[in-house]
Amino acid sequence: MSVQTPHLSPEAKASLPRHVAIIMDGNGRWAKERHLPRIEGHRAGAESARAIIRASGELGIKYLTLYAFSVENWNRPKEEVDALMKYLVHYLKTETPELNKNNVRLEVIGQIYRLPENVQEHLKKTITTLSRNNGLTLIMALSYGGRTEIVDAVRSVASKVKAGQLDPADITEQVFAQHLYTRNIPDPDLLIRTSGEMRVSNFLLWQISYAELLITPTLWPDFRKPQLFAALEEYHRRHRRFGAL
């Protein structure tokens, strides 16, 4: 995807994806190219997140999932992880008023119990503050891993079977999906990955089975409204067959 579209065509507006998921990659490389500390890349990436959240809400996209922190990210240097957690709290404090003003709801998926207590507290507070909104639902994937999610769902299903609450013969895709972190969220229609890497990085492995995949070389801190519009134009040009003709 190389074309950057400053305006969205009426045709693309008429066929918007209901749910857009984004692997926000490239913050570190963006900072390295500018001889800046990695945390500056994360700060710039937060500006992109702000712009994309606002644009998605204005367009009428109903769900936006941002891959903010993976289970693998816990293996990064402690200094960077601590800085990310502090910045997440700062983001929640400063952005909640605007999110509320723009009618955005917040949901969080992942192993939230692994996050520092102060982060968990601010997440709960923000979720409560935004709970009555009915515009864009912003889903933040934090301490998230697709395989971990599936294993957790299997454990939940197995527990119900063991307790006699669920017959194995009644386990369908729909029943299993109700045990995932995303149980009340529709599957993504469009998955965007920035920075040009050709992999899904353990993100929404069950949910993206039929999502349209779009890889852009743009680093996440440089991904703003024109790049989002270009992605939506490309999505409009796709023909989704779901295995049929």
Image (cartoon, rainbow, N blue to C red):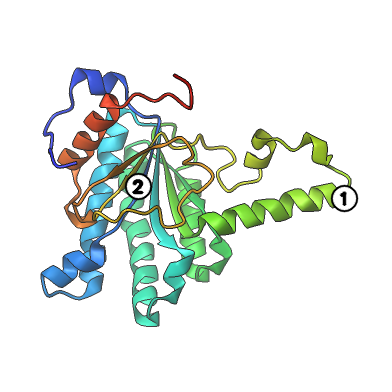
Asked where in the image residue 231 lies, by quadrant, the reply is: top left
| Mark 1 crowdedness (10 Å alpha carbons): few <14, some 14-19, many ≥20 | few
Residue 110 against residue 136 in the figure, above or below: below
Query: Which amino acid lies under the numbered mark 2 shown in the image of this protein?
Result: Ile
Label 2 secondary element? strand
Return the residue at label 1.
163
Label 1 secondary element? loop
Q: Residue at x 41, y 33 (%)?
A: 189
Residue 61 horizontal side relative to residue 228, left or right: right
Q: Position of residue 79 (x, y in %)?
A: 35, 81
Asked where in the image residue 94 lies, by quadrant, the reply is: bottom left
Query: Which amino acid lies under the numbered mark 1 shown in the image of this protein?
Result: Ala
Q: Residue at x 46, y 46 (%)?
A: 129
**Which of the image's four quarters has the N terminus?**
top left
Marks 1 and 2: CB-CB under 8 Å? no
Q: Position of residue 7 (x, y in %)?
A: 13, 29
Determine the CA span between mark 1 and mark 2.
38 Å
Q: Residue at x 23, y 47 (%)?
A: 216
**Which of the image's four quarters has the C terminus?**
top left
Q: Position of residue 178 (x, y in %)?
A: 65, 40
Q: Which mark is residue 22?
A: 2
Residue located farthest toward the front when viewing the structure as drawn:
245
Residue 10 against residue 159 in the figure, above or below: above
Residue 128 horizontal side relative to residue 215, left or right: right
Counting every numbered tag in the picture gives: 2
Q: Residue at x 79, y 35 (%)?
A: 170
